[in-house]
Image (tube, coloured by chain):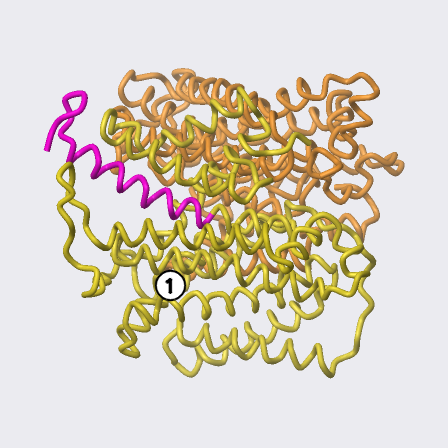
Chain colours: A orange, B yellow
Amino acid sequence: MANASIAIEPPLGAVKREPRGTAAFHRLIFVGLAVLLLVGPFLLYPVFLMKVLCFALFALAFNLLLGYGGLMSFGHAAFFGMASYISAYSAKVWGFPPELAILSGTVVAALLGTLFGALAIRRQGIYFAMITLALSQMVYFFSLQAKFTGGEDGIQAVPRGRMFGVLNLANDLTLYFVVAAIFMFGLLAIYRIIHSPFGQVMKAIRDNEPRAISLGYRVNQYKLTLFVLSATLAGLAGATKAIVFQLASLTDVHWSMSGEPVLMTLVGGLGTVFGPIVGAAVIVAMQNYLATLGAWVLVVQGVIFVVCVLMFREGLVGLAARLLKRPL
Amino acid sequence: MFTIFGIPSAALFGQLLLGLINGSFYAMLSLGLAVIFGLLNIINFAHGAQYMMGAFVAWMLLNYAGIGYWWALLLAPILVGLFGILLDRNFIKPMNDNNTKRSFVMVITSVLAMVVITYLGVNPSLGFAISVGIGVVAATLWDRFGPTFVALGDQHVDHLYGLLLTFGMALIIQGVFRNQYGVSGLPYGIPPQLSGGQNLGFMFLPNYRGWVVAASMFVCLVTWFVIEKTKLGAYLRAATENPTLVQAFGVNVPLLITLTYGFGVGLAALAGVLAAPIYSVNPNMGADLIIVVFAVVVIGGMGSILGSVITGFALGLVEGLTKVFYPEASATVIFVVMVLVLLVKPAGLFGRAQ
């Protein structure tokens, strides 16, 4: 293992200079996305859309780490699920308003991310993935045994409450716009991180870690920061999900949940800004559509994994980026 | 019977034995993972699913063909190993060669066959098996008669994609078995020759459990011997270090790689057959185990064969001891050990620093 971190085939234009007008093009996409978010609930079932948005944010957080840091985490369910538990518990038992519940879930995810990140960055490549997977399994067993998580039952009937004391979240449409705002915030934060000097250094580390070290960057600090950012955003997604579905359960911390953002990112396009969103929409829609098939969903997901890895590594958005000759 | 630290000896040694049994599964599985990783450069996420397949094949042999435990012990690893070779030929090797046309043919044919078969109303799991078979035949015919493509050069494929590929395979295998057999678990009896047990004075030793520990230790030792002390093992170790050079010396490295994968998978299946009478045969039995085995691999490092065997058994014992003294932590203790090892010796106990 000569190169220390997982080297991903460089996404289109990631390190190379972006073609002229890319920023404007991205702004156009953001506007289009905002319009879609505004009209979405009038065309589709809002709860379905909220599910897509929560998972899209989760996948975006995962992609931030893998696509731009080259760090493959197979344990993001720990942050998603733990934040979901904390958010649900604080809203239900302590009577926190939703904004505080989501915030506390996110903060806990950030702390957990700091802890896990500090451990996982001690090894590289494939070991990094195995360590994060093992650590998240530890969180799963903890959640199974701990009192506050409700064990097999999970935390049910979480009150949605009133956001900032005014927005009644019991209304699906109101809740939808709150979730959409959270999602947009997450997406813009990630976009900002990727295009900041910090993001540029991260890409350099991803592409050639020894060189980044020789240039004097404290690689481990950068990696840890990125890991914490990713865990925090995954936590934000999980905490929001608990309020939306009024439920936090063992499913959220199970290892199969860690596979979801991986699949979504892979389908949408690894290392693209917008890929995870498309991937999340496709996968959540598929899961809804195929729900009657029972365990065959697992088989279908497995086939998608295999096909994506073998023949379609660029993903849907990656393909679009290639056709449009612009990074997306 | 006597007591140690207030614990009855029977309970203590009973749990230690259980730990040793778990340890033998850890050892066999991490051994297989290490051997596969060495030569194929992938972490075989499907290892747990293949362990589960071993148990299921033993169960099927008994219930559909009337073939008992002892033959299953031989046949199941061979069958599952052959299945592993199919996986390698159709997916892993094309990926490593960066020439996935064959996989493309295989997937397209299988999916089409599955659609037709579902339309005909055949049992879906059987239909899935048949369509995969058709896909394999189509891919083989394609390889033989179809146009040849030059591989895209000797581009080293990332470990990451190997992990994702085998993760997908694990999902597929698990999904198919879950569809057919549910998640409740199927009973598989202990062979009559090994029923009963011995009273050792300080504990009661069920014969079958003693056999599992002895058999897996034997298998691990034989594997170690073959890899470290024979000519075949020397080829294998050399190919791990530098496949191109070994190929230049006239060793058929692609064949060696395929057989190694088949062997590693067979080892997992053997562990599955050994496990079948102890744990119920269940489609999920491998999924949780493989994560623990990953932790074992992180702790031991994949550099040394004997190292992964020792780590496997030792961690099984640690787990058993925890069950006696602090049962709440028994599910997490191996992960805690992993954290400690990462803090003290990040490369793993037997690992080489990079």
Mark 1 belongs to which amino acid? Phe
Residue B333 position, x and y percent, is 36, 29
Q: Secondary structure at mark 1?
A: helix
Mark 1, residues whose alpha carbon is within 10 Å: few (<14), some, or many (≥20)? many
What is the x, y in percent for residue A124?
A: 64, 32
Q: Quadrant of residue A152?
A: top left
Q: Residue at x 46, y 43 (%)?
A: B309
Q: What secondary structure do most residues of the magenta stretch adopt? A: helix
Instruction: Identify the magenta region.
Output: B1-29
Rendered view: B50 above or below B217 = below
For the C terminus of chain A, the image quarter is top right
Q: Residue at x 65, y 44 (%)?
A: A275
Placement of the N terminus of chain A among the 4 image quadrants: top right
Name the one closer to the observer, B180 or A59: B180
Q: Give the residue displayed 13% in from the left and 29% down from the top.
A: B8
Q: Residue at the spot x=48%, y=53% of the render? A: B47
Q: Position of residue A46 (x, y in %)?
A: 45, 42
- Residue identified by numbered label 1: B177
Which chain is mark 1 on? Answer: B
Is residue A174 visible in the rendered structure shown here?
no
Q: Is residue A142 above or below residue A197?
A: below
Residue B23 is covered by the magenta coloring: yes
Q: Is residue B224 above or below residue A50?
A: below
Viewer-side residue, A118 vs A239: A118
In this picture, residue B63 sits left or right of residue B196: right
The single residue placed furthest to the left in the displayed view is B1
Q: Quadrant of residue A10?
A: top right
Q: Give percent across and percent down for residue B287.
A: 41, 49
